Each structure stands twice: as C-alpha cells, then as structure tokens.
Image: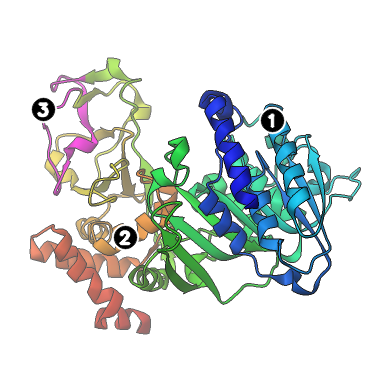
Amino acid sequence: MLLEHVITTTEKYIEDMPKAQRKEYGQFFTSEATAKFMAGLYKPFWKNLTCISVLDTGAGSGILSAAILERLHESKLKEVYLTCYENDVKIIPLLMKNLSYLKRNVSFQLNFEIKTENYITSQTSDFNGDLFSKGIAKKYDIVIGNPPYMKVSSNSAEAKSMPSVCYGAPNMYFLFAAMALFNLRDNKEMVYIIPRSWTSGAYFDHFRKYFLENGKLEHVHLFVSRDKVFEKEKVLQETIIIKVIKTKKVPETIKITSSNGNNDFDKIHSLTVPYNVVVSKINNYVFLMTTEEEASLLSKIGSWNKTLLDVGLRMKTGLTVDFREWKYLKDKEEKNTVPMFFAQHIKNGKIVFPCGKHGEYLLAEKKSLLQLNSNYLFVKRFTSKEEKRRLQCGIYLSKKFSSYKFISTQNKINFIDNNEHNLSKTIVYGLYVLFNSTAYDMYYRILNGSTQVNATEINCMPVPQLTIIEEMGAKLIASKILTEEICDSILEGYLYGKERRSEKIS
C-alpha cells in the first residue's frame, strides 16, 4: 500500500513533466517491482532493534524510501530516521508529500529529512579526509539508491571533489555509489541500481579500487533485456542491481541472479559463484556470468596467470581516423600510397584486400598514420548486439603485401603486435585460435556488456604462455581451416585435456 501510493503519484509526475527536463538531472524512476526486489535484498538485521537510520541518496519522488519503509512496516522498530538527498526543485514538493504520507501510515515513528544540497560536494572534505574536515559525515544502517545517470566534465565540482575515484570525465552514478559506501556503517548493506559499465575498463579503475577495497559484493542482479529496466522511460541501458557489504573481509561466494526485465522477478535464475571468479584480483574487473557453464569457463581461463602484456604482446587501436584524414585517402593505388585496412577487409578469418571500398589506400606523407608492414592479428572494434560473435578476427601476414614497407589501419579495428619485431606466423595463428574460439568470445561478452572491443580489456585477459600459443598456431596451420569449430577443438585440448596438464608440469 505504501509503495503503491508513491508509484501512483510518480506516474502522474512523469506524465506532466517532459522527459527532456528530467534528463537534465539524469532522472529515471525505479519501477514498483524493482523497488520491492531491491528492498527485499537486505538481511533483516533490525529484528531486535528499536531504531535504525536509512539513507536514500537520490530520492526523486521517494520510491525506494517507500519500498524500504514498507519492508520495515511490520517490524518491532520504534523509530526510523530517514534522510533523503534531492536537489531537483521540481520534484521536491512531491517528495515532501509522499514522505508525509508515509509518516502517517507506518507502524513506527518516522523522522525524515530532505537534504537539498549537492550530495557529492557537500561531503567531500570528509570523504577525502581533508585537513579541515569536520569528520561529521553521518553513517547509516541502510543505504539505497537509484543515482542520476549523467556524465559531467572533468572540471565539474563533483569530479574535482572526488579525485581518488575519478579518471577523466566521470558519470555521476559512480560518484554517488562511492559516496554512498562512505556513508554506510561498517558491516551494513547498501543496494544500488546502476549501469554495469563500471565493471571493467581502465576508465573506472580508480572507482573499482576504492569501491571493492572498502566494500564487498554479496549479490548482483542482471537484467537480460536492456529496454525493460526503465520500461516506461524507454531507456536502453545495461543495468544491474548490486548489494554491497561495507567490509574488507572477502566472502567465499557471490550470488548472481538474472531476470528478463523489471516485472519478471518471479522468474529469476540464480547462481552462486566463488568470489575470486567474479572479482579479478589483477584489476578488480567484475565478471557477470549467468550460467554454470559461464562460471566454469571463467574459472578455467582465469587459471592462466599470464596476459598479453606478460607474454610481450599488446593490442592497439588502428592509427587512422578516416573521416579526419580524408585528404590522404585514395580509392586506387598511386605513387607513394600504402594499403589502408578497414574492418570490412576482415572476412572469415582472412584479410581480403582490396575489396572495392572507398579510401583503401593512404598517402604515406603523414608518418604518424603509418605502421610497419608486419604480421598482425586484426580484430574488429565494433559489432552489433545481434551478431553471433563479439570477437571477429583476421590473420594479416606481411608477406602477402611484401612490396610495402608500411601499411595503415583504420581506428575501427584493433591489432596485436609486440612492438619489437615481426610476429611469427605461428604466434599470429595461435592468437587467432584464442580470439576466434567460442570460449574467448564468451569470456569477453561476460567481461564487457557493450559492443565495442576495448584494447585495454583484451590486454588484461588471461592467455597461456607464448610457447603454448605457438603450439596452438602450428596446429591451426596444419589443419588449413580457420573455422570457429577448429579453434574450439584446439583450445579445448589446452583448457581441459592433456596439453593443459603438460603446461602445468612445465
């Protein structure tokens, strides 16, 4: 009844307030089913208490506050202190009305406060431990939030206020999440609904370090359909719900659940996975698998303790942004031109050049756009959600273009080299076995929910030692077939068979 009332008033607000105005604040409202699910994730630690404190970090109309209070409604609590942060002047009157309604209808004394100051900048001296910090930032028993989803510049007050968790131009959601953990009492729980983008990549490295050192994930819920989380808002977002305990003690396992959308919580798939399989010790990447098969795969590949960088290799992004360098591009070979490779040249594991694309040749005047004509593994940077594979590779062998000392690559492909000398043919074929396999494609999909293949993430993926990569390449060359099935059969021998056992012995 409590939550239903707040949902009804919120729906009226949404109808009256244009989405463009709400988007200025990054404001998207939690559904009733999602709010109930989030409130239900907390352990009922309050059973024998008479008073607790609750923080709603981006309260909006009070949906998550209502969900928590409804959960506490039949408890033995005598008092609940609720603090709501909200600085959107348009919605504050509705928040006040909803909290007043909740106060009249709960079974305990509700003391609520609406803080209209900036949630981030008003607390940063305490968060950063500044010399003049008052050290009075309040700590709460329960923290819940659906933070604003909006990018701010690196010069914004919020970004400058939290330098320890920022890298570049941040998104407000992870600043809110870091501050929320700071506001939580030790050994208590916070539940947040946020994008999954923070789970990997260098961009979020500082945030992950702070967040996962000071708190531990206990439960992650995934939404399979991007368009059903904020269904009425028509938002496409890779969104997850996380439950975090403020502790430095690493738990043994994490519970991962998944549902199709925000109204399918009665059809949840559940999985319990070892913590170190989900959270990488190397870079704090968070792997969000949904099946036992994926968990097993992560464990197998994760047991390789090398990365591309460790074995002397590196994935890089293509050098030429073609639309900026159009004056250097030619459709046909001319004097002083070199081949210019695009994603379209990668076909069924091979490099097909020329293919009739515009700008397939580059004038070799601008040295920064040139790279040595060496052996490479090319990998497409962008694919669509509908495509079967995320990792789409092509083997580039320099001898097929032996008349050129240099080539160039468009920035929509990545390439793997070693910076020093020409990769051997067997290493390139071995890399193809890895990155054209079902296992590595699945691994990368679990690691990164987007359609972009990020070089930083690939460079951190576990790989076998270089001698094993060469062995794989020799087998692929002998097979003379570049299919995914052949790559799978070769790789599986090293993941599950005797070849893998002999690697461990060596």
Mark 3 surroundings within 10 Å by alpha-carbon count, few (fewer than 14), some (14 through 19), many (20 or more): few
Find residue 88 and name its label.
Answer: 1
Query: In the rendered structure, which amino acid carries the disc numbered 2?
Result: Met
Residue 308 picture location, percent across and down: 39, 58
Residue 357 picture location, percent across and down: 15, 27
Residue segment shown in magenta:
330-358
Position of 431 relative to 45 (above/below): above
Find residue 356 and name its label.
Answer: 3
At a point 33% along the width and 79% down the height, the residue shown is 503
Query: In the rendered structure, which amino acid carries the disc numbered 1?
Result: Asp
Question: Which quadrant of the view contains residue 47?
Answer: bottom right
Q: How many marks?
A: 3
Gap between marks 1 and 2 measured at Cα: 42 Å
Give the labeled residue for mark 2. 442
Q: Which color scheme does this rendered protein use?
A: rainbow
Magenta span has 145? no
Provide the secondary structure element on which disc 1 rests: loop
Residue 252 picture location, percent across and down: 56, 77
Question: Which quadrant of the view contains residue 353?
Answer: top left
Instruction: Say which of 428 and 51 sits in front.
Output: 51
> Which mark sits nearer the N-terminus, 1 or 2?
1
Position of 87 relative to 204 (above/below): above
Provide the secondary structure element on which disc 2 rests: helix
Residue 21 picture location, percent across and down: 57, 24
At a point 52% along the width and 65% down the height, the residue shown is 279
